[in-house]
Image: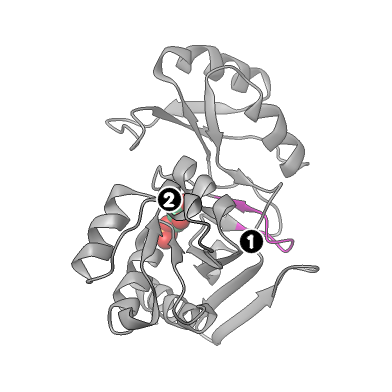
Amino acid sequence: MDRNELKRAAAHAALDELVEGAIVGVGSGSTVESFIDALRARRERVAGAVSSSERSSERLRAAGIEVLDLNRVLAQGRDIPVYVDGADEIDGALRMIKGGGGALTREKIVAAACGRFVCIVDASKCVARLGRFPLPVEVIPMACELVAGRLRRLGGRPAVREGFVTDNGNLILDVAGLQIDDPAGLESELNQWPGVVTVGLFARSGADVVIIASPEGVERRAASGARA
Ligand code: 5RP
């Protein structure tokens, strides 16, 4: 099985996590695109989607799934019980690095508005320790050098993602070489820096469930104490 087949297998298994007739939160990336494709055949099962990127929204609409405005959904008091998204890395405590596709800010917002976070990955994304994947950090353009300098002082090697602007009009710094001993602590610290919009660590609030596809099959794991 190649990696795309594994992504499709994980995406397909996530259909079993949906709540019948409810709105679903949808992340971004190629694994999520497979999820949207799988959802197309069962679109009557959802009351629409709240999306974390323009790209996912386009694909959802093409699949005949209505894309709803998050503010309106919340103002109406409607529930979004499940959020489905991929990850660049996930550890045993279901903490993640995300943002390889640059949609980290909206992903964090939509995930925070939803109930259970269901992460879908192929097994290559599972790590014992976060940090091999360069950590994406979304920054306000005028703060780019300020934030990059601070990241260097932490031991990181930040690089501006070339030719890329986020859906929010900002830049991404991809930070290699960081020693991530305390993912939640680092997330909290970077979140305080002026000019940082979002750090791609999802550790203070990680996934509730991970669906991992490997050549041996599809495995579902729930975080301890999660809404499994
Ligand atoms: C986008 C993300 C994606 O979930 C992450 O990059 C994984 O992508 P893919 O499914 O293409 O491997 O965080 O911002």
Main SS of the magenta part reads loop
Give the extent of the magenta segment: 90-97
Measure the C-alpha gap from mark 1 to mark 2: 20 Å
Q: Which residue is mark 1?
A: 207
- Badge 2 marks a residue whose secondary structure is helix
Q: Residue at x 53, y 12 (%)?
A: 146
Q: Which mark is residue 136?
A: none
Q: Residue at x 33, y 70 (%)?
A: 36
Q: Residue at x 54, y 79 (%)?
A: 17
Q: Amino acid at mark 2?
A: Leu
Q: Which residue is mark 2?
A: 70
The image shows residue 57, relative to residue 170, as above or below, that is below
Q: Is residue 65 left or right of residue 201?
A: left
Residue 38 shown in magenta: no
The image shows residue 123, relative to residue 184, as above or below, that is below
Depth check, front residue: 28 or 44: 44
Residue 170's x, y, as percent?
38, 27
Sequence-wise, the earlier of marks 1 and 2 is 2
